[in-house]
Amino acid sequence: MGDGQLERPGPGERLSALVALIALAVAIAIVGVGAAANWQGLVITVIGLFVIVVGGWYVVSRRGVARSVAMLTTLMGVVLLIAGFIVADLSILAVVLVAVLAILSVGAARYALRESTETMRERVGSRTRSRPPATPC
């Protein structure tokens, strides 16, 4: 890893990424079928679901301010999702199933994007340190 080449994800990470994407697609399909009679609820719910999952992916893959912004964005997605369920008047089973699939998608993405402690230490250790400036600005 120290020679500048990226480590390819293993089969477990690839499978987790696939599970994350499939869970998102199934959740969207459930929302679509359940809210087809009410297009406003469908639109609000799908947007909320996308915001939650994409925000969750950023939460598990970023650090610092980007992670904080992603957490706030994810919370806004939860509000949109709940509002969409209320407008669409979906059954409680559909609501719970969509929530479980969204959590599964984010959890699988976290596993797929994980790095081992050794890999992170190696990456930090391989970076060259910059010299202090010769003259202050």
Image (cartoon, rainbow, N blue to C red):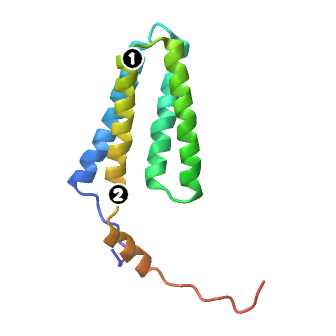
22 and 5: which one is in front?
Answer: 22
| Residue 10, visible in the rendered structure | yes
Q: Amino acid at mark 1?
A: Ile
What residue is disc 2 on? 114
Q: Quarter holding the N terminus?
A: bottom left
Tell me what residue is drawn at x 22 percent, y 52 percent: 12
The quarter of the picture where residue 135 lies is bottom right
Residue at the spot x=44%, y=11% of the render?
36
Residue 133 relative to residue 20: left or right: right
Q: Residue at x 51, y 35 (%)?
A: 51
Vertical relation: 88 (above or below) 112: above
Q: Position of residue 73 (x, y in %)?
A: 57, 41
Q: Secondary structure at mark 1?
A: helix
What is the quadrant of the C terminus in the image?
A: bottom right
Mark identifier at residue 137: none
Q: Secondary structure at mark 2?
A: loop
Q: Quadrant of residue 27?
A: top left
- In the figure, is residue 66 to the left or right of 52? right
Instruction: Give the residue at mark 1.
Output: 92
Look at label 2 and name its amino acid. Answer: Arg
Residue 95, above or below 1: above
